[in-house]
Image: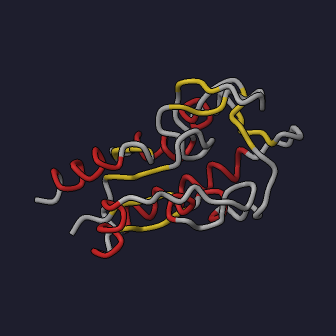
Amino acid sequence: MRKILMSACLLGKRVRYDGGSLAVTDRIVERWLSEGRVISVCPEVEAGMSIPRAPAEILEGNGDDVLSGEADVVEKGGEKVTPAFLAGACVALDLCNRFNINVAVLAEFSPSCGTSSIYDGSFSGKKIAGMGVTAALLHRHGVRVFNQYEITEADKAVHATSG
């Protein structure tokens, strides 16, 4: 049975920067949980960042740019936290490799987990197209990344590869 990597905050775990969660109530996720498919991860927490922690955004780029060394992840106060975000992304990739995972459901807009949109680095609430650091690393390694608004599509992807 195929496992699915899923952002811990989407599972109701209070791991977000503000100590909150983004709990998703969905029958598909409930089925995945009952089947034992879900592997939970919060890249920032896995990298040793605290709960709560300062909000962070990718400055002048996206997750691919961070992976290429062309952009940094910075906290609202200006402190660079790029190494922690890279370390957390590596933990997520290790989990995918360990459990042969090729589908992930990640929290949209996060500087780690955003799959198609992230905040623009200005801390103004403006969003731009792009992936977070973890999503970009997983994508580079062939993991299909979905967000919490694409659970039906993620379920189809899991079952398409279960054979």
Q: Residue at x 41, y 40 (%)?
A: 140
Q: Residue 150 at x, y = what percent?
A: 36, 43
Q: Residue 151 at x, y = what percent?
A: 35, 49
Where 81 falls versus 99 (above or below)?
Answer: above
Position of the C terminus by quadrant: bottom left
Report the colour scheme. Answer: secondary structure
Q: Nearer the viewer, residue 162 or 69?
A: 162
Q: Residue 33 at x, y = what percent?
A: 36, 71
**Is residue 63 found left or right of 160 in the rendered image?**
right
Position of the N terminus by quadrant: bottom left
Toward the right, the furthest residue is: 77
**Is residue 64 found left or right of 30 in the rendered image?**
right
Q: Residue at x 16, y 59 (%)?
A: 162
Q: Residue 4 at x, y = what percent?
A: 35, 61
Picture quadrant of residue 149: top left
**Is residue 103 found left or right of 159 in the rendered image?**
right
Q: Residue at x 77, y 27 (%)?
A: 122
Q: Residue at x 47, y 38 (%)?
A: 115
Q: How many marks?
A: 0
Picture quadrant of residue 132: top right
**Is residue 57 found left or right of 3 in the rendered image?**
right
